[in-house]
Each structure stands twice: as structure tokens, then as C-alpha cells.
Image: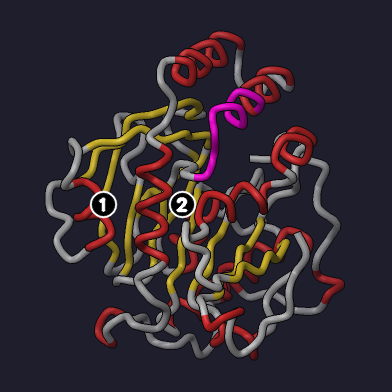
């Protein structure tokens, strides 16, 4: 996907979203889906496509929206990544991404983080992220929603028509250990304490992959086993979860659409984080192009 220059309004006056890709396309994703950008946009674009515009930025390669263009976006979506969102040794682009997320959240923009994006959003807003105590979580997992979701219309509407759980594809070895100040845990599972969290009404993190399809998961499992990242038994177990019915993808993508369409810049003032005057020391980062190294040739593009 190419990066379209931001304009004052999207085509036809519709909404404009920035997709922040924190991973490189796997060979399979390119051949089967035309790349992860297409996977995300295909999953999250409104069905009526009422003039909606998606601009894709490969933040892993140092492509970021221009600061003066941030007000033009209704929302921002952060993808998964083979990189960690935690640790002092995080790549410069990760620290710059965290600063961006703090900024747009303070502006009241809708921000959706998926997997790595969920963890980066947590870190950016003051939470704590680290290695999952139980190791890798791979496969289709059942996620349970907390009983009280009052105030989150996109979630209330979705779970009112089903039981208080839904299955989702997960591929991660890190997780949110502590939600940011003012954050609320909205879902959990037997392996992951924070499957979904929100801060105010304009920041949402989801540990799983609403956008993934079963074929993407099966290809990832094969690559994880092939590189000895997970063992064969774990791979077999993960395959069985994919072959026994798959994720509730329509539910999850509908939930994400409902959140994103809630409107950019509409969070009540009390729910917003104050504008960031100076970056926290652990997130400070130079913004020169030279600061961004070429993307690592990681064997797994999550």
C-alpha cells in the first residue's frame, strides 16, 4: 500500500484513518493477501465505504504521519510486530511510536492497538508490559469479557447478542502486566490477564488479532515451528484450535469498527490525558531519519 498524503478531508467528506504497520510483510501475506496492510484495511473498513480513507505508514521503517497532519485523522490503528514493546533497548521507532500514541490520545483521537500495538499503547500511556509468565500463546483462544462494560457502547452492543466470551487468534510471548493509570480491563483469558483494556473512551488495546484469518494463523504456526520458536507439540495444539472452528472474526472486526467509528476527538475532557509537554526519559528519542535502522530480518512477521 502507498501512503496517501493527508488532506483536510477524506474523499467525500468521510473518515480518515492512519494504519501504523509495525511489521514487514511475510512472503505468505504478500502472496495470499497482498500484504498485512490489505489484511487490516479489509477487516476494518466500513462496509458501506462512505468515502473512508486509510493511509498506511510503515513505522517499522521510520514512516510516520507528519505532526501537522495528526488533526486530520479520526483514528489510528497499530499492528502487531515481531519486536518487543517493552525494555530500555527498544528500537528508536518503538519509542517514537509511543510518543505518537501519547500525543494522539491526548488529542482525543481514537487509538486501537492490536497485539504489539496493544502493548505499545499500554506502555505509551504509563502501563507496564513484559514477557508473559506462561511463555508463548499461539492459536485460537477463548476470551471472557468482564461483567461490567457500562459506558463502552461498542462492547455493550456486541456482547448483548451472545455469551460473555468470544474466540480470537493469538500469537504472542509478551503481554500487558499492568494497565495504564485510569485504564480498565475489559477482557481476560485463562492464559492472559489483560486481553483487552481501555483508557478513557478513545484508547483500546486488544491482545489478540481481530484481523487475522485461519490461513494466516496456520502459516505462522508452521514458521514458528520451523524456526524452533515453539516446539512441535505446541504447534500441533495450536493447529487443532484453528481446525476446530476458528475465531469469531466477524464479532471482533465488528467490535473494532464500532470503536473506531465512535468518532475522533470526542472524548470528554475528563477522560483525556493532558497533552504531553516533554517525553518521559525512557521514551525520549531523536527524530532524525538516521535514527531509524533498516528493519531487522526477523524470521517471523506477526
In this picture, is 163 found above or below 283?
above
- Residue 218 included in the magenta stretch of the image: yes
In this picture, is 269 found above or below 29?
below
Disc 2 or 1, which lies upstream in sequence? 2
Magenta segment boundaries in residue numbering: 211-219
Q: Which of the 4 image quadrants contains residue 300?
A: top right
The residue identified by callout 2 is: 129
Query: What label sits on residue 288 in the rendered view?
Result: none
> Which quarter shows the C terminus?
top right
Q: Please tell me whether mark 1 sits on a helix, a strand or a loop.
A: strand
The residue identified by callout 1 is: 186
Q: Coloring scheme of the render?
A: secondary structure
Q: Please tell me whether mark 2 sits on a helix, a strand or a loop.
A: strand
- Measured from the top left, where is residue 241 in percent x and y? 44, 18
* Residues at marks 2 and 1 touching, judged by CB atoms closer than 8 Å: no
- Residue 260 included in the magenta stretch of the image: no
The prevailing secondary structure element of the residues shown in magenta is helix
Amino acid at each position: 500500500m502507498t501512503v496517501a498524503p493527508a488532506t483536510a478531508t477524506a474523499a467525500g467528506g468521510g473518515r480518515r484513518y492512519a494504519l501504523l504497520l509495525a511489521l514487514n510483510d511475510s512472503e505468505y501475506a504478500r502472496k495470499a493477501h497482498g500484504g498485512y496492510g490489505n489484511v487490516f484495511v479489509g477487516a476494518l473498513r466500513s462496509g458501506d465505504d462512505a468515502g473512508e480513507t486509510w493511509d498506511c505508514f510503515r513505522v517499522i521503517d521510520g514512516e510516520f504521519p507528519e505532526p501537522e497532519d495528526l488533526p486530520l485523522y479520526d483514528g489510528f490503528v497499530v499492528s502487531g510486530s515481531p519486536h518487543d514493546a517493552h525494555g530500555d533497548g527498544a528500537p528508536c521507532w518503538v519509542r517514537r511510536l509511543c510518543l505518537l500514541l501519547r500525543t494522539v490520545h491526548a488529542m482525543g483521537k481514537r487509538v486501537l492497538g492490536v497485539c504489539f500495538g496493544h502493548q505499545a499503547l499500554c506502555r505509551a500511556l504509563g502501563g507496564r508490559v513484559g514477557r508473559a509468565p506462561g511463555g508463548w500463546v499461539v492459536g485460537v483462544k477463548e476470551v471472557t469479557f468482564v461483567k461490567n462494560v457500562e459506558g463502552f457502547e461498542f462492547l455493550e452492543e456486541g456482547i448483548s447478542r451472545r455469551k460473555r466470551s468470544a474466540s480470537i487468534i493469538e500469537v504472542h510471548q509478551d503481554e500487558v502486566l499492568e494497565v495504564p493509570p485510569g485504564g480498565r480491563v475489559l477482557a481476560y483469558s485463562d492464559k492472559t490477564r489483560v486481553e483487552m483494556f481501555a483508557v478513557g473512551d478513545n484508547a483500546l488495546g486488544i491482545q489478540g488479532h481481530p484481523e487475522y484469518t485461519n490461513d494466516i494463523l496456520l502459516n505462522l504456526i508452521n514458521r514458528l515451528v520451523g524456526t524452533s520458536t515453539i516446539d512441535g507439540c505446541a504447534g500441533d495444539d495450536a493447529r487443532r484450535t484453528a481446525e476446530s472452528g476458528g475465531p469469531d472474526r466477524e464479532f471482533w472486526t465488528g467490535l473494532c469498527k464500532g470503536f473506531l467509528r465512535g468518532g475522533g476527538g470526542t472524548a470528554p475532557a475528563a477522560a483525556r490525558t493532558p497533552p504531553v509537554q516533554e517525553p518521559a526519559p525512557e521514551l525520549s528519542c531523536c527524530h532524525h531519519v538516521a535514527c531509524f535502522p533498516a528493519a531487522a530480518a526477523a524470521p517471523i512477521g506477526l
